[in-house]
Amino acid sequence: MTNPFFQLTYEPAFASLGAEFADRVQPATFPQHILRWRNDRLLPLLGLQPEQVQDDHFIEAFGHFADPHRQFLSMRYHGYQFGVYNPQLGDGRGFLYGQVRGVDGKLYDLGTKGSGTTPYSRGGDGRLTLKGGVREVLAAEALHRLGVNTSRCLSLVETGEQLWRGDEPSPTRSSVMVRLSQSHIRFGTFERLHYHQRPDLIRQLLDHVLAIYYPHWWQADLDPIDRDILWFQELVTRVGKLCGQWLWAGFCHAVLNTDNMCITGESFDYGPYAFIPTYDPKFTAAYFDYYGRYCYLNQPSACYWNLDKLQEPLRLILPADRLQEQLAHFAPSVQGEYRGGMVQRLGFERNALPESIQQELVQKTVDFLYIAQVDYQGCFAQLRRAFSPEWRDQPHLILGDMSPNAEPAFGAWEQWRQTYHQALLQLSDSALQQMPDRLAQANPLTYLLRPSIEAVWEKITTENDWDDFYQLVHNLQNS
């Protein structure tokens, strides 16, 4: 049977930019190929049905990389890492496998991670630890279930090598992962061209981004500068919305360098991430983020800083004052998305309540979560389990089993209950009856915390038992 992945129609969109943007590379050869994860939910987006695709097809395509017609491109970029510019970056352990038009009409990247060394490996081995691959699968599925705009993993193949890492017990197992995302063009892709003072290539890259990812602006009958400025405004808004999604999801990305910021405003590249266990504005996911630059509540300021830095290459071709003006759209985008997402997690439609009540409800919710230090995700899951339309008429029933025993948590909880009751009074009978469905959509009963990841990994590393991993993924997707 012909491999269905080899029959896909790959488009050379990024490759058409030319040799200044990427290097052709060859994947590593591996001593072993065991398919550990295949994301059957993504196959229909590519026009494939799961029953058409065998495990061996995944291994042949994304373990052996045996498609003779593929040209693999290691993408060139630079970036600010923890505020310091690094011109020694680029795809160091992955490449662009190909680009495929989805059934929704959008172009998607298939990008590898752990597929071997490239000109940008900087002395590294170009590999991905198996635990790193497992963690990225889990992060992407958890975020997708919550409704965050995220890349997702298509496959994970264990490759049979022993790797040495300073942040994992070593030797540790190796893997190669394939990520499906909207684009792998980063802020750092533009920054590299600024470093080399190539406004001609910045113009070429921006035209490419507009034509492929923002066709509504590319095709608009506008002055070219107006068009480009409106594109930047939309990017600012998209990134702001993404930050708001991370916040209401309780997610800390951990490494928001400019090479980890995508030009489509999509969340991707999950390393030392973590979901917050309790509401802690200073929660920091990466052990090496000593000063909390990328802590949970600093994520919007970090992304704003990155957008500000992105203006440096864009100023070579666009007016600086007009670019700067667009940053004013960032904070309202973050705030609007955060408020709307929190209101949804509390069971309401985003625009069903007056803005003043929305603001008060979200603030009282955050106050309670912060003061009581209850399980952040568990609190929303419990709201989903316990909700009853009777709460509108009997407010003393609202989450009565969560009553804290001591002040000031009890006071914050009581204020939250009163505000929640006032919000319920705003609803029609039909809207009230729909709240259980909205709560179920917004609040999965299974959520991803570090202990659950470590428990899954312990079974894998000690017994090579993957059942708990598959069960966790299933629960993240379906609960």
Image (cartoon, grey):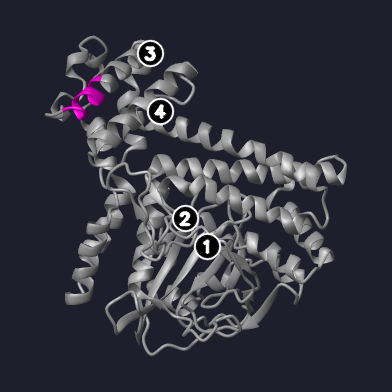
First in sequence, mark 2 or 4: give its number.
Answer: 2
Label 2 and label 1: CA atoms lie apart by: 7 Å
Residue situated in front as seen by the camera: 221 or 167: 167
In the picture, measured across the screen, residue 198 lies left or right of residue 233, that is right
Prevalent SS, magenta region: helix
* Residue 409 lies within the magenta run: yes
Classify 398 as above or below 146: above
First in sequence, mark 3 or 2: give its number.
Answer: 2
Q: Residue 160: percent from the left, percent from the top? A: 34, 85
- What residue is pinned by disc 2? 293
Q: Quadrant of residue 156?
A: bottom left
Classify 280 as above or below 340: below
Q: Is residue 434 visible?
A: yes
- What residue is pinned by disc 1? 82
Segment tinted magenta in the rendering: 407-414
| Residue sitting at x 86%, y 46% | 224
